[in-house]
Amino acid sequence: MAESRYLNTPILRNEQMFGTQQDYIGIKSDVDNGVISTFQYMTKPLDRLDILANRFYSDGRYWWIIALTNDIGWGLQVPAGTILRIPHTSDSITDRL
């Protein structure tokens, strides 16, 4: 029998999870209701979410913030001319997790 790749993964014991579905629903609701302030950005050719996250947050790993606030599923590329809502700071999102 093959070993599980999760065999040596630590088990979370304090019953707290990072980034649960409830967190994401709450963040999306706060964006929609204006609790988290955003600005609009129209994408240009060759824009990707990770590149935009690097431009606006100085860290491309925050691409998921832009995806979350714009109902973008899995994927980093968006068509040119797409209007995105970009939260003013990444802290406004990450502080809620």
Image: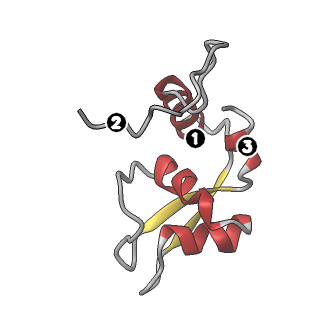
Identify the element where label 2 is drawn: loop
- Which of 60 and 83 lies nearest the eye of the viewer? 60
Residue 33 falls in image quadrant: top right
Q: Which mark is residue 31?
A: 1
Identify the element where label 3 is drawn: helix
Residue 92 in percent (x, y) is at: 73, 43
- The Cα atoms of the two marked residues, 1 and 3, are separated by 10 Å
For the point 72% across and 56% down, the residue is 88
Sooner in the amino-acid sequence: mark 3 or mark 2: 2
Crowding near the residue tagged with mark 1, few <14, some 14–19, many ≥20 C-alpha atoms within 10 Å: many
**Quadrant placement of the N terminus:** top left
Sooner in the amino-acid sequence: mark 2 or mark 1: 2
For the point 68% across and 47% down, the residue is 37
Callout 1 amino acid: Val
* Residue matched to label 2: 3
In this rendering, position of residue 71 left or right of residue 38: left
Labels 1, 3: front one = 3
Identify the element where label 1 is drawn: helix
Residue 97 falls in image quadrant: top right
Relative vertical location of residue 2 with respect to residue 66 in this rendering, above or below: above
Q: Which mark is residue 92?
A: 3
For the point 56% across and 28% down, the residue is 23
Callout 3 amino acid: Ser
Crowding near the residue tagged with mark 2, few <14, some 14–19, many ≥20 C-alpha atoms within 10 Å: few
Labels 2, 1: front one = 2
For the point 57% across and 75% down, the residue is 51
- Which of 46 and 87 lies nearest the eye of the viewer? 46
Residue 67 in percent (x, y) is at: 47, 54
- The Cα atoms of the two marked residues, 2 and 1, are separated by 42 Å
Callout 2 amino acid: Glu
Sooner in the amino-acid sequence: mark 1 or mark 3: 1
